[in-house]
Image: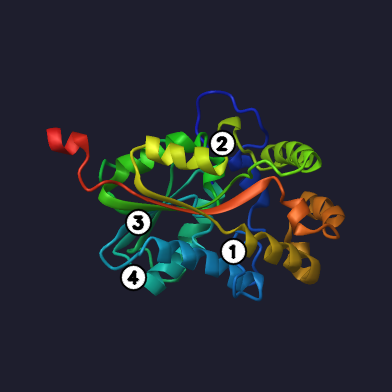
Amino acid sequence: MQETSGAPRRFWPSPRALYSRLATRAFTERGLYLNLGYWKEAQTIDEACAALALLVAETARMGPRDEVVDVGFGFADQDMLWVEKFAPRHITGLNVTPVHVRIGRARVERRGLSSRIDLREGSATAMPLPDASCDVVTAVESAFHFNTREAFLAEAFRVLRPGGRLVLADLIRAAPADTAGGRRWQACTWPVFARIFSVPDANADEREGYAGKLAAAGFGDVSVVPIGQDVFPGWHRALREDRALFRRLPLPGQAAYAALLPVTPERVYAALDYVLTSARKPEATVADALG
């Protein structure tokens, strides 16, 4: 997960502090995934977390010719899965949390994948990479942390080659509810989510504005598809039914969810919109034509 230096942040902890505190408290039983999962067909948290990573790779049409940059790679579970399933030429992972980089590198080395996956400490908004150096940029459930998402999109555009693809599994702010009571509930719960999970004010994007930021960054073929119906209910049901998963949550998370589990997911996540986002850098930019 990422953050940048510069202007003071409103929220605490920072993404680096948040995920350093979590250390290796992962959601899954076998791997170290940290996403909410894609539950369209999955029955367990392990299946759902891998399914979300696969959905991102499939949306990016990841393949053997691709050089991939994965921003906010967690403990590299998704990167190892992608190498095994889609065989990209190379994956460079960027992450600002030192424990993720250290453990991720060790896990990649144990799997014999160090020549295919290079994990680095680096920011989403100041990527230590040359211009036009990759074919795919991904961020799986991490871009809402980036300070700011807009700065990240500019960097993603910079490092992509013409024709390169951007794919994100991302959390944004839901559109206002139809009722006054629903809107009041959203207004109460969004700031709680933003504070706990270190979401900068500038990232309180709703779907239309979010798509607009992609276009403003220069991307074309922008698609923002809501998939929350295949994320939130499955995750919430798993927390209710899988006591081992519940115990793997950090203690503050257990305390919060203990009161929320009897509540419907539609109510709990009313302020959130989960989207699968894809976009493409145009084949020839104005700068390319002038150069």
Q: Nearer the viewer, residue 19 or 286?
A: 286
How far from the left and from the top, in percent, is residue 197? 66, 43
Q: Amino acid at mark 2?
A: Asn
Q: Is residue 97 above or below residue 86?
A: above
Q: Which label sits on residue 32?
A: 1
Viewer-side residue, 251 vs 159: 159
Percent of width and height locating residue 121: 45, 45
Can you name the residue that lies furthest to the front here?
Answer: 178
Q: Residue at x 54, y 48 (%)?
A: 142
Horizontal relation, residue 119 to residue 64: left or right: right
**Res 87 label:** 4
CA–CA distance in space, label 4 to label 3: 11 Å
At label 3, the amino acid type is: Val
Q: Which mark is residue 203?
A: 2
- Would you say the residues marked 1 and 2 are in contact, meaning their CB atoms lie under 8 Å apart? no
Q: CA distance from mark 2 to mark 3?
A: 24 Å
Q: Is residue 127 visible?
A: no
Q: Callout 3: few (<14), some (14-19), or many (20+) C-alpha neighbours within 10 Å?
A: many
